[in-house]
Image (cartoon, helix red, strand yellow):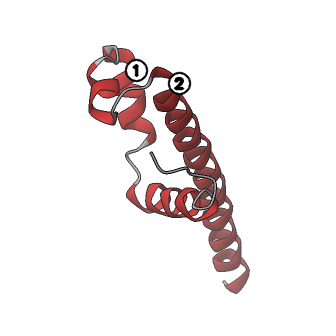
Amino acid sequence: MDLIVCFLVGIIVITLGLMVVAQYKYIEAMDKRQKELNMTQGEMYEKMSFQENMLHRGIQSNFITGAIAYFLYKLINKNKRTEF
């Protein structure tokens, strides 16, 4: 029984780790795209096609991994940002 529980916990941890990495990369790409287009976040989302909007919602739908990835992104890029 303990082996099964350890196996399931391991699967959950690995899955969450992979999801955090994917969310982090997505947040990083969206931030880069926002800077390249020189738009506010609201303008950028308004100009998204329906398909892009649905993909965005699908990727950002998991609150736990999204929050962890966002926190890591802000923590890592805190010193890289320049003030306008």
Task: Measuring from the top left, give residue 6's x and y in whole percent.
Answer: 69, 78
Kindly identify which residue carries mark 2. Answer: 36
Residue kind at label 2, given as amino acid type? Glu
The quarter holding residue 44 reads top left
- Between discs 1 and 2, the one toward the N terminus: 2
Q: Helix, strand, or loop for circle 1?
A: helix
Residue 41 in the figure: left or right of residue 67: left
Residue 40 in the figure: left or right of residue 4: left
Along the line of sight, which residue is nearer the eye, 75 or 14?
Answer: 75
Task: Measuring from the top left, give residue 14's x and y in whole percent.
Answer: 68, 61
Identify whether 2 is placed above or below 42: below
Identify whether 30 is placed above or below 69: above
Residue kind at label 1, given as amino acid type? Glu
- For image coordinates 64% across by 78% down, the residue present is 5
- For image coordinates 66% across by 63% down, the residue present is 11
| Rendered image: mark on residue 52 | 1
Other residues around mark 1 within 10 Å, as few (<14) / some (14–19) / many (≥20): few
The quarter of the picture where the C terminus appears is: top left
Task: Measuring from the top left, give residue 39's x and y in whole percent.
Answer: 37, 26
Task: Measuring from the top left, give residue 69's x and y in whole percent.
Answer: 54, 57
Name the outermost residue toward the bottom: 2
Tell me the mark number nearer the camera, choosing from 1 and 2: 2
Give the Cα separation between the discs numbered 1 and 2. 17 Å
Along the line of sight, which residue is nearer the eye, 15 or 38?
Answer: 38
